[in-house]
Image: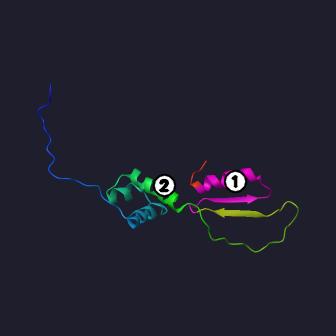
Amino acid sequence: MTNGRVEVITSVERRRRWSSAEKEQLVAASLEPGASVSSIAREAGIHASQLYGWRRQLRAWRGTGFAPVQIAPEVAAAGPADRGAIEIEFASGARMRIVGAVEPAMLTAAVAALADGRRR
């Protein structure tokens, strides 16, 4: 049997086109400390998953590049246990502090994970 109900569509709704600047503005707002992705997406009239997708796209588009480096003044070592330290702050806000000797493979894996924005 067929249903006697018929739906008539009288207008054509088109997808909204977002400029790169609009996307970047919404992504930047979502990355602010204390910001709620859901509320920002709701205010813009999009689903939160769309905003998360734009964040991934922007991260992939920007890729990895050069970042400013600050070298701290050298401090006299207090003893043989002090071998120096390296502190890395990623664009995502994550920080890594390395003290003493580290295996290169372990350091490479940790930097790759944090540069990706993933946390383990």
Question: Tell me, what colour scheme is on the image?
Answer: rainbow
Q: Bounds of the magenta span?
A: 91-115
Percent from the top left, x then y, of residue 109? 67, 51
Q: Three-letter amino acid code at disc 1?
A: Thr
Magenta highlight on residue 66:
no
Q: Which residue sits at x=77%, y=52%?
A: 103
Where in the figure is residue 114, as x and y percent of width and height?
Answer: 61, 55
Instruction: Reply yes or no: does residue 109 show up in magenta.
Output: yes
Mark number displayed over residue 36: none
Helix, strand or loop status at disc 2: helix
Label 1: element kind: helix
| In the image: residue 39, left or right of residue 32 | left
In the current view of this chain or complex, which residue is farthest to the left?
A: 4
Instruction: Please name the amino acid that badge 2 sits on.
Output: Arg
Camera-nearest residue between 49 and 97: 49
Q: Position of residue 36 (x, y in %)?
A: 42, 57
Measured in 3D between alpha carbons, the distance from the residue under mark 1 to the one under mark 2, in whole angstroms, is: 22 Å
Location of mark 1 (residue): 108
Who's the residue at 11% across and 32% down the image?
Answer: 4
* Left or right of 59 on screen, residue 40: left
Q: Quadrant of the N terminus?
A: top left
Q: Which residue is mark 2?
A: 56
Q: Would you call the spot at circle 1 few (<14 residues within 10 Å), some (14-19), or many (20 or more)?
A: few
Q: For the residue carrying disc 2, how many other residues have a C-alpha within 10 Å: few (<14), some (14-19), or many (20+)?
A: some
Residue for point 39% across, 53% down: 50
